[in-house]
Image (tube, helix red, strand yellow):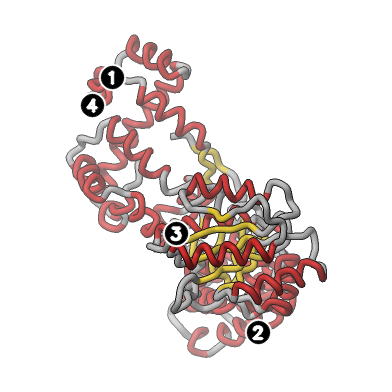
Amino acid sequence: MMFFFRSENMLGNLSARLQETLRNLKGQGHISVRHVEESVREIRLALLEADVHFKVVKEFIPRVQAKATGQEVLQSLTPGQQIIKIVRDELTELLGGGAADLCFSKIPPSVFLMVGLQGSGKTTTTGKLARWLTKNGRRPLMVSTDVYRPAAIEQLSVIGSEIDVPVCRDRQLTDPLALAEKALRQARNMGFDVLLVDTAGRLHIDEELMAELEQIQRVTQPVETLLIADAMTGQDAVNSAQDFDRRLGLTGVVLTKMDGDARGGAALSVKAVTGRPIKFIGVGEKYDALEMFHPDRMASRILGMGDVLSLIEKAEEVTDQEAAVQALEKIRRDKFTLEDFRQQIRQIRKLGPMEQILKMLPQAGPFKGLGDIHVDEEQLTHVEAIISSMTVQERAHYKIINGSRRKRIARGSGRPVSEVNRLMKQYMQMRKMMKKASKGFLGKGLSKLNFPF
């Protein structure tokens, strides 16, 4: 498997800056008030550079400093660790404290009104949320009231067919309010328990947009009015959240594009500024790339402590537990074949992009530096192609793969012989590493994750 290093991460430089500052603090044998003040100053700069709202920073920093300079911390045997815990706890509170669940009506359907500016990812997020609801036992119906953008209704219909969720549409209706009313009737009559209303966006907030949304809100009486905000826009996302909240009374926010080069300011500011919780974050383009937002897990991820709980949840969704146990047993008995390796690659790719998975691991101990690794997903496809070009016997007994067989495998997979040789070398190294790891920390602590490396 081929890795390439790079420095960018989900929250830009914020995570790296905070980790470096706290790492320096942790390395001090004795911590004085001066050490704390210097570290707090660095944390303040890191937050401001990450586009966190200045009022949020102004309130956050004194709380951290007051707790970090307390006598029980400074006189502790592990003051550095105590301060890291203080920063983590304060970040968790800043992000919302606890996860905010969706609300549902006692009498279905529960209406979710999806609002936001144009380009924020409303339509795609509507599809992602519909898929999430379906996976969690709900029966959603979707409708688009965006009659202004020619492809908007068609886009939602395409998404609906891809995720197998029905879409209410009527080519004769051109009035957003009439479309919403029809969808509500259809949801009631056909037993759908959730109606997702994808509304029109604008390039900026205007009176016409807000008036239309207020009308739809009055007619549909949503239990959730969710703002879909682009995390890449930083403080603009927070400002739009304030404007939408004043007119519509938001119940929550969904931050999209959190897998990009977002600096993190929107995620850290939106709850503190608006009082409305972040309920979901979008972490990729695929329809399953929507995660419930857990403030404590995000705070841990920012500070390099990992998010193993989310990773385990992902793994449990896609992993065949019986196959996982069999694979682990094969590793322990040194019987892990190339066929097993291929199956493991397929399993782990279901979890999502490898870079996101690696960032969920704690950036310390055996996982230090993994969050900075760039995995070329195309190379994983090439690895699969190479293994698939082998015979059943070759996949089961790698030692028989000699020079002539490697040439044939290269021709069959469309890859150069050098790649086949590199794969075989890495596979043999991996077998040794996995056998050793299965007896120690990885085997005991993370065996259920079923990683192919």
Label 4: state its secondary structure: helix
Residue type for callout 3: Pro
Check disc 2 and report the residue beneath it.
62
- The image shows residue 175 at horizontal and vertical percentages of 71, 61
Q: Residues within 10 Å of mark 2 (few under 14, many from 20)?
A: few
Instruction: Identify which residue is drawn at 34% across, 9% down.
Output: 404
Q: Quadrant of residue 197?
A: bottom right
Q: Which is closer to the viewer, label 4 or label 3?
A: 4
Check disc 1 and report the residue beneath it.
391
Q: Residues within 10 Å of mark 4 (few under 14, many from 20)?
A: some
Q: Residues within 10 Å of mark 3 (few under 14, many from 20)?
A: many
Q: Are marks 4 and 3 in contact (CB under 8 Å)?
A: no
Q: What's the mark number on residue 396?
A: 4
Single out the residue that lies furthest toward the bottom. Answer: 71
Of callouts 3 and 1, the N-terminal one? 3
In the drawing, does residue 293 fall left or right of residue 386? right
Q: Are marks 4 and 2 in contact (CB under 8 Å)?
A: no
Q: From mark 3 to mark 2, how far is it between C-alphas?
A: 28 Å
Q: Which is closer to the viewer, label 1 or label 2?
A: 1
Of callouts 4 and 1, the N-terminal one? 1
